[in-house]
């Protein structure tokens, strides 16, 4: 294995960046930075340092300026002095201070001398903005989207302000009707107040409708953006995430976004805005009757204490309800996906029993959550009725003593309702709020998971040649599972056709998963074109690498759309050429709609052999430098398999091919055949070499050819 070393110039550049990063409270070890960012060049430039800075978590940009404007630039910054990077730390009137990695110390230099050796370019550094992926998923995730629609949010707040003004004005008008109109019997005053009340009765529902419409519209926009980000994040997660969870559970978590959207677009947020105006209402209440106001505030304290007492129990029961619901969804998804196996095995009744048992668990959990929610609602209602009775009793006493008028008592009770009603509504939607919190946690299970490390400025190899090296690779799927690959080393030259065989569970397919960087080795290195995949961009890697699995999945759509899936801009000629190379053109042309034939969900309208040939065509259309065939012909009939084998030399032309097979006739023409057992290579050689010795391969070959 070739090992590339960094020149002193490269090391000085990285040391300068690491030194400047300390000013942003980012400590990084130079050798670790070199390894993680894949810097192995003989020279280092601004672009490479920008990529390294991005990996550290800094924004970097190159700017050109003159010596006279240098004092205006934010420091520290990286500059080149005589071709080597230094850190510009301070600028005085006649002197600059620099950190020199070569001297490993801070040095001073006069401005005239500095201007002679400086090329006028600065690598500016700044703290990166906090990425959404760095923050645990929660309500804070909605803030950027709300900022994006700030004008709409301002309209909602403005309309809410008018609604609250109407809510304040209505009790005051009632007070005047009772205390002035009834006492003075003034018809003219009654007409004026009646018109005012009529206007308020018209405008309040109008403003409420406008606010509700704006809220629903805003919630839909925010939900659409977050759903798009959720799906983007989901497909960027490592394979390990999907291997540890059932498909139905993942689907259930994605669907929780709908619960969050319903909560946001419902009455919950409007209620929160109304709560924000409660302080103003309380101030007005104190102006009417301080003692009655303290009774109202005392009831609020009781509400809060009641919530604190019952909240944890409600949260646990709602969590149990959601967990059983997710288990139900997972079971249903698994049953529908495997319906053919269920029917052919005649186990429908057994699955029905399991479904009823699972459904019963969900209903019991839902009932328990609902029961405690009813207790919460009734408890809040009881506190509200007791406090209302106490306030009315004391208020009547104040009226009888002349400290309060009848109109003021009516107005006070109406205003008190504006304080207590949001609290009562909060009690009514408390279960919805608990559902929303749990939905946030469940969606957070996806969004808080770390993505594949393709966004940290990792290395890429746009001109891939196709050489592959496994160097002392060990791998296990998790800490408790046995070792699948054990200290395996393998060198594959660019353009070589390699066959890999062995018993089931020997680690053959795992090698290809490591090559695709779907998983990372426990120890050792997987190297492509001299680049360690630990620092490779997985997306860029997979663009140059195609895989055909034993059961490759097609997607609903036409045959042409499936073949061109990895190359959307493919021309009809490219699609046909790929199909011909895969031996699929003939059967496609025999179909009534040809390449526009709809394959159905998962390709269900085609036979297994037809699906596999389309999958091979899909893999070939991108002209990959590395092609992996993982039991790719196992689903084909002998005639179709023979067609693929006959075309293998043409398929393999100009690319590295790794073919995994149990049927040895599919790999007999490979340049080299590797026999794997228990994660180790036990034999290697050409077909002729292995069959001319008493090898494990020869025994398998004789067994298959004799049968």
Image (cartoon, helix red, strand yellow):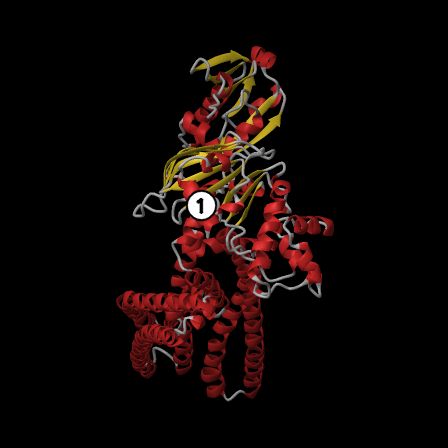
From what the image shows, is residue 108 above or below residue 347? above
Q: Which residue lies furthest to the front in this view?
A: 706
Along the line of sight, which residue is nearer the eye, 336 or 128?
Answer: 336
Along the line of sight, which residue is nearer the eye, 667 or 395?
Answer: 667
Identify the residue under disc 1.
702
Along the line of sight, which residue is nearer the eye, 340 or 502?
Answer: 502
Would you say 537 lies left or right of 650 here?
left
Would you say 58 lies left or right of 438 here?
right
Would you say 381 lies left or right of 640 here?
left
- Give the x, y percent position of residue 287: 39, 69
What residue do we see at 52% from left, 58% from top?
A: 227
What residue do we see at 51% from left, 18% from top?
A: 9
Quarter residue 378 falls in: bottom left
Quarter residue 422 falls in: bottom left
Quick check: can you spot residue 595?
no
- Give the x, y percent position of residue 692: 46, 35
What residue do we see at 49% from left, 56% from top?
A: 142
| SS category of the residue bearing label 1 | helix
Badge 1: few (under 14), some or many (20 or more) residues near its Cα, within 10 Å?
few
- Give the x, y percent position of residue 330: 41, 65
């Amino acid at each position: 294995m070739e090992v590339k070393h960094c020149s002193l110039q490269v090391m000085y550049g990285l040391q300068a960046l690491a030194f400047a990063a300390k000013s942003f409270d980012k400590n990084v070890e130079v050798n670790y930075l070199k390894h993680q960012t894949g810097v192995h060049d003989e020279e280092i430039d601004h672009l490479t340092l920008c990529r390294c800075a991005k990996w550290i978590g800094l924004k970097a940009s190159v700017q050109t300026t003159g010596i006279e404007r240098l004092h205006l630039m934010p420091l520290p910054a990286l500059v080149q002095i005589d071709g080597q990077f230094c850190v510009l730390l301070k600028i005085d009137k006649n002197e600059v201070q620099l950190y020199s990695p070569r001297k490993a110390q801070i040095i001073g230099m006069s401005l005239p001398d500095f201007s002679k050796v400086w090329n006028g370019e600065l690598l500016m550094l700044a703290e990166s903005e906090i990425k959404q992926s760095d923050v645990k998923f929660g309500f804070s995730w909605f803030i950027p989207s709300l900022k994006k629609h700030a004008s709409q949010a301002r309209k909602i707040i403005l309309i809410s302000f008018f609604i609250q003004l109407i809510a304040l004005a209505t009790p005051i008008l009632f007070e005047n009707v009772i205390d002035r109109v009834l006492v003075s019997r003034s018809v003219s005053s009654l007409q004026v107040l009646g018109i005012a009340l009529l206007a308020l009765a018209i405008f309040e529902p109008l403003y409420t409708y406008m606010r509700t419409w704006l809220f629903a519209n805003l919630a839909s926009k925010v939900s659409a953006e977050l759903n798009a980000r959720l799906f983007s994040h989901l497909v960027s997660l490592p394979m390990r995430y999907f291997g540890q969870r059932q498909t139905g559970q993942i689907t259930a978590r994605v669907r929780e976004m709908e619960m969050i959207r319903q909560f946001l677009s419902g009455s919950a947020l409007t209620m929160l805005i109304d709560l924000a105006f409660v302080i103003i209402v309380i101030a007005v209440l104190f102006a009417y009757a301080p003692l009655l106001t303290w009774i109202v505030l005392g009831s609020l304290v009781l509400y809060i204490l009641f919530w604190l007492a019952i909240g944890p129990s409600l949260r646990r029961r709602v969590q149990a309800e959601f967990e059983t619901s997710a288990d139900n969804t997972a079971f249903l998804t698994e049953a529908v996906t495997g319906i053919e196996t269920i029917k052919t095995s005649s186990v429908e009744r057994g699955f029905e029993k399991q479904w009823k048992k699972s459904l019963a668990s969900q209903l019991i959990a839902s009932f328990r959550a609902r029961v405690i929610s009813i207790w919460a609602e009734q408890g809040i209602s009881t506190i509200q009725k007791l406090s209302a009775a106490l306030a009315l009793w004391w208020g009547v006493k104040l009226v009888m003593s002349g400290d309060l008028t009848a109109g003021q008592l009516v107005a006070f009770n109406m205003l008190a309702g504006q304080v207590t009603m949001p609290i009562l509504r909060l009690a009514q939607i408390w279960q919805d709020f608990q559902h929303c919190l749990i939905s946030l946690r469940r969606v957070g299970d996806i969004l808080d998971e770390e993505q594949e490390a393709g966004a940290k400025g990792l290395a890429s190899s746009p001109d891939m040649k196709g050489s592959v090296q496994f160097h002392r690779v060990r791998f296990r799927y998790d800490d408790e599972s046995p070792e699948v690959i054990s200290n395996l080393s393998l060198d594959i030259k660019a353009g070589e056709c390699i066959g890999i065989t062995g018993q089931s569970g020997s680690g053959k397919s795992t090698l290809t998963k490591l090559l695709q960087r779907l998983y990372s080795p426990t120890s050792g290195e997987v190297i492509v074109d001299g680049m360690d995949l630990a620092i490779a961009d997985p997306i860029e890697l997979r663009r140059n690498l195609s895989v055909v699995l034993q059961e490759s999945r097609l997607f609903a759509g036409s045959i042409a759309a499936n073949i061109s899936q990895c190359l959307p801009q493919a021309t009809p000629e490219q699609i046909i050429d790929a199909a011909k190379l895969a031996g699929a053109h003939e059967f496609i042309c025999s179909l009534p709609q040809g390449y526009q034939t709809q394959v159905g969900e998962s390709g269900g309208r085609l036979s297994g052999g037809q699906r596999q040939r389309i999958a091979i065509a899909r893999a070939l259309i991108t002209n990959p430098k590395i092609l992996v065939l993982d039991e790719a012909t196992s689903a084909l009939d002998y005639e179709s398999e023979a067609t693929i084998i006959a075309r293998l030399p043409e398929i393999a032309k100009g690319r590295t091919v790794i073919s995994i097979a149990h049927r040895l006739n599919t790999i007999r023409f490979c340049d080299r055949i590797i026999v794997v057992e228990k994660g180790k290579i036990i034999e290697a050689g050409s077909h002729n070499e292995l069959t001319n010795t008493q090898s494990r391969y020869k025994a398998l070959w004789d067994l298959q050819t004799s049968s």
